[in-house]
Image (cartoon, rainbow, N blue to C red):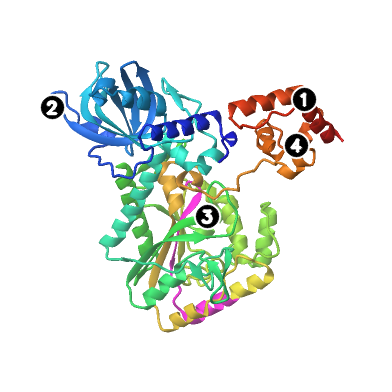
Amino acid sequence: MNLIDLSEQEVIRRNSMEQLRSIGVEPYPAAEYVTNAYSNEIKASFKDDADRRPVQIAGRIMSRRIMGKASFMELQDSEGRIQVYITRDDICPGEDKELYNTVFKKLLDIGDFVGVKGFVFRTQMGEISIHAEELTVLSKSLKPLPVVKVKDGVVFDGFTDPEMRYRQRYVDLIVNEGVKDIFIKRTKIFNSMREFFNERGYIEVDTPVLQSIPGGASARPFVTHHNALDIPLYLRIANELYLKRLIVGGFEGVYEFSRNFRNEGMDRTHNPEFTAMEIYVAYKDYNWMMAFTEQMLEKICMDVHGTTKVKMGEKEIDFKAPYKRVTMIDSIKEHTGIDISGMNEDQLRDVCKQLNIEQDETMGKGKLIDQIFGEKCEGLYIQPTFITDYPIEMSPLTKKHRTNPELTERFELMVNGKELANAYSELNDPIDQRARFEEQLRLSEKGDDEAMFIDNDFLRALEYGMPPTSGMGIGMDRLVMFMTGQESIQEVLFFPQMRPEKTIKKDSADKYAALGIDEAWVPALQKAGYLTIETLKGLNPNKLRQELCEMNKKYKLELSNPTAEEVEAWIANADK
């Protein structure tokens, strides 16, 4: 990389890296550095009257206070931060004091990784610290970290821009307290759910991500191509149909944490790549699954927080079982005053017009009902609530309701105005399932690009017989949002999908050459802000020449400075 492309701090750090090597200190050593303690554990276990405890830790320098022969630095490891006290004569017991005087004081920077061997003590100010006896350079940081200052609990110069935080999550994790804790809780949530399933004897499995038919949900898929087989393939939108095949094959209970992909919109609660958990258990129905789901969520909340209550902004959500149950028809009736039961497509369109709800000609009965519920009801359910008994048109994979053939045995769990879980008494009648798929095909031909494909192999599996089964899917990213009190899905994904970084428009070197400018000067011109030849028009030649001469000296470009006449000619050519 050309040094002229770097900031002043980056240039200084690269020079420090080279100086370390010149004095025999490798800035990126290969050897293992053995640690035996962590910052938070050291502070939690310290006792003033205990014997002196030797420790060896490693981490990133987050601050330094250099005071002659003795200094302090703050070290951040994977658990937290701890103060380190360093004296020249302790880490340099012999005649050679270069490790302290040169390496520590001049060549190390905030962000560098070091190893420290020493003992734990309490300073006169009462802070539990490490007294360093050995210091080892482990990795040189070539880019400066954002300096986040905290005074009296108030944060200054915070690294808070969401665009930067999500794009550079590695920096976000380093400098912003609490971010790492969200992702630690995410892992605890997954582990708690696994434990709940495993204790009941259910088996975790893997199913294909690349699928010839994107089944199991109504969503627009991503399309790719398999070169060796010369066939189109789809990134999975759901794993439901594969898991049901395993129930056909004799497993009593299977589950999978599946990475799914839906080529749809992005907002604060949706990402095109997301994690879902789906579980299927034979000989159960949706009533059993409701009780199972609320027991699972109560356990997860207790495992993560030690309580069933979670704060979401100003709201407190309580995951303690049991949860309220409301049918979809009753919910729409309660919140709109309209009973939609038995209505046909035209009547539902009239209801949408009456309620000022958007619709289009591609929508069938299911989509219209879903639109009414989504617009007028869904956002009102803050505490966990099961919405049950969905119309048959909305649920092509669900068993008909045992007492009303116009409905299905399905529930969705609403939390904080959003769907969290979706579950069925699974349709296992292959004749009925084929008819439902064919209705989806009709909707697809009508223009609904989220309608399901017909999966003939899945129908063949059902014809071999699938026992009565209940299945449930839960959006793990949304669950983590609820369990950690986050309003945006981007906060619970390490690397959410982002638009490509904007690149600054720069003219190519040949355009500058056309003005008579030596291409060797182009990086310097663009570093000075003259990114296009358009920006050279009307410039003061003396001012431009002075800028270039200063840059030549500062960055040691070793170019021949342009004459005043040459610079005048450049600008004259740009003005033509």
Q: Kindly check if marks 3 and 4 are in contact, taking CB atoms under 8 A apart as contact.
A: no
Query: In front: mark 3 or mark 1?
Result: 1
Read off the residue under disc 1.
Answer: 564
Front: mark 3 or 4: 4
Magenta span of residues: 416-438
Going by the numbered disc 2, the residue's amino acid type is: Ala
For the N terminus, which image quadrant?
top right
Looking at marks 2 and 1 on the same chain, the residue that comes earlier in the sequence is marked by: 2
**Among the two numbered marks 3 and 1 on one chain, the one whose residue lies closer to the N terminus:** 3
Left or right placement of residue 374 versus residue 354 in this view: left
User: 95 or 58: nearer the eye?
Assistant: 95
Mark seen at residue 331? 3
In this rendering, the label closer to the viewer, 4 or 2: 4
Q: CA distance from mark 1 to mark 4?
A: 13 Å
Report which residue position mark 2 lands on. 50
Q: Secondary structure at mark 1?
A: helix
Q: Quadrant of residue 219?
A: bottom right
Inspect the image, locate mark 4, and give the three-letter code of the amino acid beneath it.
Ile
- The amino acid at mark 1 is Ala
What residue is shown with label 4? 517
Magenta includes 431? Answer: yes
Residue 69 covered by magenta stretch = no
Q: Would you place residue 533 above or below residue 291 in this image?
A: above
